[in-house]
Amino acid sequence: MKNLTQISEECRKQAFDLNYFGAKKWKSAQKGRVLVGYLPIYFPREIVEAMNGIAVGILGVGDQKQVIKGDAFYQSYICHLPRGVIELALDNNFNDFDGFIFPSICDCVRNLSGMFRITKTGKFSKYLDFPQNFNPLTGGVFYRQELGSVQQEICRINGVLPSVKILNEKIEKYNQNRRFIENIYAIRQEFPWRLSAVDWYCIQRAGLMMTVEEHNAILSDVQTLLEENQGEPLDNIRVVVSGSFCEQPPLGLIKSIEMAGCYIVDDDFILGSRWIQGDIDSKSNDPMNAIVNAYLTQSTFSSALYDVGNPKGARLVELVKNRKADGVIFCAASFCDPALLDRPEMQKSCDEAGIHHINFQFHENTGQFKVIKEQCGTFSDSIKLWA
Amino acid sequence: MNTLLTLGIDVGSNFIKAVLMECGTTKSVILDKHTEKIRKRNPAQLADEMTTHLLEKHNFQYDDLAYLASTGEGDLVIRKRGHFYGMTTHSRGAVYFDSTAKTVVDLGALYVRAIRVNPQAKVLDYKMTGQCASGSGQFLENISRYLGLSIDEVGDISLRSTKPEVSSGICAVLAETDVINMVSRGITTPDIIKGIHLSIANRIIKLLSALKAESPVFLTGGMALNKGLIQAIQESLQETKKNFIIKTNPDAIYAGAIGAALWGAYRYHKLKQGKVMAKVVA
């Protein structure tokens, strides 16, 4: 078994591969395989895998690629993620991709789906509208139709028809995947020094570039390694990072938070992999219905989700308490309307619960972290010394 | 045993400062202190060697330390128990030297920071110089090198000035150009140095005004021992009719490391208390 450093290094390479070599190699190994790219936050990837494909997570270009053409597509007040994604499309990084899914999260991503159509990137571009009505007879039926149209698109490409048995198998694999991820979060909650937040982020993000079976094998090794006692704890505070669910923070930012004396015990960086809380029924005669029901009843909280019955502020407070965190760092991408509009309400919930918090914004290509380190350092000190 | 052995390490951009302290409930004393200029050495390795050196010198083992605290570039301190931010440690160090201090000015290599503190050394507010390094120790060191002086002698040389020539206080590049022009115009070295000191002093006074600082003001960091700079600050204060008492200490360069060591002792007690509380609750 490889050690944690080796695993995280390999995952880092895969996670940030803007040419998607791993996924393309997988596709080229067998005829009839499909690659479907999807944007944040969530898409039930098991549907694509059950039809001989991989749903590849597209999380922008970070600080790896200079965006030139992409800037011409978006106004200055739009976040950085879609600019980088259209730049990748125009530079042919998505060659070999068969289709793209744009989950309804904000206007920018919706517009991006139109741009992919105009630029004829991939064989299909699907703007996936998620239900905001959680009644199974309305929102449920609608959502099922939306997912069905994705299945039809894939079937048109490779002729594979959805099978109950295979979809149930894939649902079970993704159940395992979520269990591994939650177990590792639980271990990191108790022993955050055993695996840095940066390494853990890379390991999770790499999962969006490969089959669930491959990722489960990696997660299984990571869990085993983390169960061994190792390293010494630092006198750091424990924080939950909230607001980075779409455009991803640069690794330097995550590292800066940790270096400033904060253990990140929970976050929403790769939220899509943890969207469904708990298992989805994998023994159903109607697995599509199980996936739909899971979305309606087991979704986590997020700015992209209508939540009047179960407000996200209260759920964030609950998460902080469960993780025994000392505070919350609200860390949203600049111009990310969903995160920034939700922030005041979530801050209010934190204030009412006596939870300390700070906030700042980032771009995926932010290169200077001095001010952020300063903010996190003083936040950490204020909690350690005066809370 | 009522005292705790703690070690504070302040990793700056030019120097690493380490202080070994015996911290009691009523009084804490410095057992030893050590400074090393980083030069081209590996700072992480150097910081570790300094830790070992101080401990061995006093026949202590690493395990005898209740808390090894870092400040500054703390990720370079391998065996640390915890890290404290520079502003927090300099405030604590200043209050250790002078319990009446109400404002602390950290005169660092890359920036100057004015901090308002309460008697417990809690940071109440702060202001710091912006992007440009023209008000910093590194800038002063560069200029002294151009003029063929060692950084230790610039203070005394500045005191010999009769007609200081003030340089740009906004931009280090412009200030360096100013100095080249001054040299070519035959301005004497003491007048050039004094002019730079006055320029830095003016930036400090602007920070103090913006902060609505209260007296006494305690200077910490590498430049706090520079007699020429202190004289320039006093003169600028008189000129601007500001009535601040300026204080410092021969060990002011260690303020960050001392603050880290003291906060380390505080955290040790707090964590121990927390564990006891957790047991009681369980």
Image (cartoon, rainbow, N blue to C red):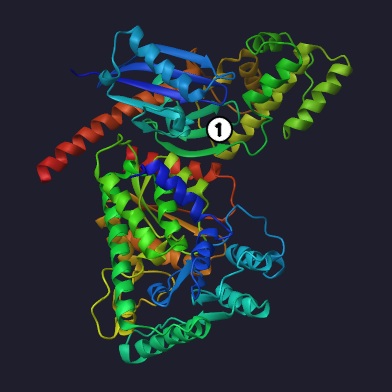
Q: Residue at x 42, y 78 (%)?
A: A51
Q: What amino acid is labelled 1 in the image? A: Arg
Q: Residue furthest right?
A: B185
Q: Is residue A84 above or below residue A235?
A: below
Q: Quadrant of residue B238?
A: top right
| Label 1 SS | strand
Q: Position of residue A124 (x, y in %)?
A: 57, 81
On-image quarter of the N terminus of chain B: top left
Q: Residue at x 41, y 85 (%)?
A: A161
Is A23 in front, or is B76? A23
Is B215 in front, or is A5? A5
- Tell me the subunit letter for badge 1: B
Q: Position of residue A384 (x, y in %)?
A: 33, 39
Q: Quadrant of residue A1?
A: top left
Residue assigned mark 1: B113
- Mark 1: few, some, or many residues within 10 Å (few <14, many ≥20)? many
Q: Residue at x 24, y 22 (%)?
A: B25
Q: Residue at x 38, y 59 (%)?
A: A215
Horizontally, residue A240 falls left or right of residue B209, namely left
Q: Is residue B244 above or below residue A47?
A: above
Q: Position of residue B38 (x, y in %)?
A: 55, 19
- Do we see residue A256 in this rendering? yes
Q: Is residue B85 above or below residue A157?
A: above
Horizontally, residue A95 falls left or right of residue A56, namely right
Q: Position of residue B99 (x, y in %)?
A: 39, 23
